[in-house]
Image (cartoon, grey):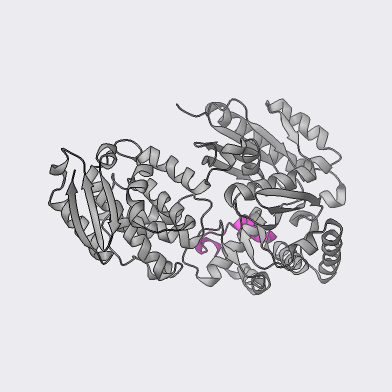
Amino acid sequence: MKREPNAIVDIGSNSVRLVVFSGAPRMPSIIFNEKVLAGLGQGLGETGRLSDAAQERALAALRRFRLLIDQMAVRSPRILATAAVREAANGGDFLKAVRAIGFKPRVIGGEEEAMLAAEGVLSGTPEADGIIGDLGGGSLELAEVSGGRVIGGVSLPLGVLRIGPPTAETEKWLRKELRRAAASTGFGARGRGRPFYMVGGSWRALARLDIISRDYPLPITHNYRMSPSRPEELRKLIRALDRADLQSIRMLTASRIPTLPTAKMILSLLVDTLGSSELIVSSFGIREGLLYDELSPEVRRLDPLTEAAREAGRGISRFGEHGDLLDSWIAPIFDDDREAARIRLAACLLADVAWQAHPDFRAERGVEMALHGNWAGVDACGRVAMAQALFSNFGGGRSFPDPKVAALCPPAMLERAYLWGLAMRLGQRLSGGLAGSLERSRLSRHGGVVRLTLGKGDGALYGETVARRLERLAAALDCKAELKVR
């Protein structure tokens, strides 16, 4: 059954954005994403009003989004307005203009905005435990997450547009404001020694700059980790951007560069105030939080990584999805813990990802999908392990193609993923990508023997290629290969 797309229009203080989601409810894919930097919050602190120019930019974007939503057959788009609109004296007039376009906007309060941003973090990082901060143009939202729940939330009028360019006086004032807020909310005491989760475009831009400066080999911001000292170290790099060729800097959007100094100042002072242990980037925020908040408890408990991989595998498999079956088939020969087992399952769900590619490039296609897919609930090491398993599954062997990327994962985990790939490769060749042969056979490991047991009447499936792959897997496990036909 084809799922209807979901559309969310986020009218923020800095940008107006349309995001259209489709696919599995637990981890829907983004099928369209467009933003316009309307700057509704620009000058709001001085005038208390939305400027005419900013309103016109925003309304022009919304008219375009209205047409796109209609053409995409989205029946019930969600239209959210945040800090700038809810605080401006002429926010009501702006909302009337939005309604005239055909939208039904909902202005969300500051506490709700903080809670939804935190729900967004949990949707992509279920194990998150610490303080989340969502930095926008007009406000900064803080909330605590622990045990899969959001514990309190607050909105502070400390957005990048409202604060403006850093000065010594501004920094002194902001430090006092953050300390006061941390003390009054209790986040100061509860944040010490725990991670701080960074949400919002300005902070993601800082993370991208950090990735560039460190020559980090995996250009994925979600779940990217920074030391609490890194924001201060970025000061010189931010200044150097004035002289840089922006078109030559990958990953960094030129429109975000003017807000970087203020974003860095807020982040540095905030993590100093909280005493954060590390900084973790979340690409999931208020929009994902809204969808996550609407899910049933049963769906919320699903693993975002394996759900996304299952959805991807469903769309690319040759003869129907059988990744779960393949994982169950190879699992008995491994002693994986819970975390390794979920990475293995995700790799199996993607075992058919490259069948349409030229045979000489299937291994590379598997690596690309694992490393750069829009996955949640997985860190850099997990991505590399998935990539190694798929590289091996598609015949790429033990040597991972990029040593710098391979270094993000311990050698023992890479070796384990290589073995997963060999087992997956055996299962795929034995079954021809179909479920029946796997259901009637069994792979086991005991007493130094890797045994393939085939069902009655399936003995002929044990061809030369299957035999070679079983022997190779057994040898890699320091075992002997054995065939048994019931």
Q: Position of residue 189 (x, y in %)?
A: 79, 64
In the rendered image, the vertical position of residue 328 relative to residue 403, given as above or below: above
Q: Nearer the viewer, residue 444 or 331?
A: 444
Quarter of the rendering occupied by the C terminus: top left
In the rendered image, the vertical position of residue 317 relative to residue 364, given as above or below: above
- Residue at horizontal 63 percent and vertical 55 percent from the top: 128
Q: Nearer the viewer, residue 400 or 130?
A: 130
- Residue at horizontal 62 percent and vertical 61 percent from the top: 280
In the rendered image, the vertical position of residue 319 relative to residue 403, given as above or below: above
Quarter of the rendering occupied by the N terminus: top left
- The part of the image, by quadrant, that contains residue 352 is top left
Query: Magenta region: which residues?
Result: 245-259
Q: Position of residue 152 (x, y in %)?
A: 77, 49
Q: Left or right: 359 with respect to 48?
A: left
Q: Left or right: 117 with respect to 169?
A: left
Q: Nearer the viewer, residue 199 or 51?
A: 199
Q: Position of residue 370 (x, y in %)?
A: 41, 54
Magenta span main SS:
helix
Res. 204 visible in picture: yes
Magenta stretch: includes residue 248: yes
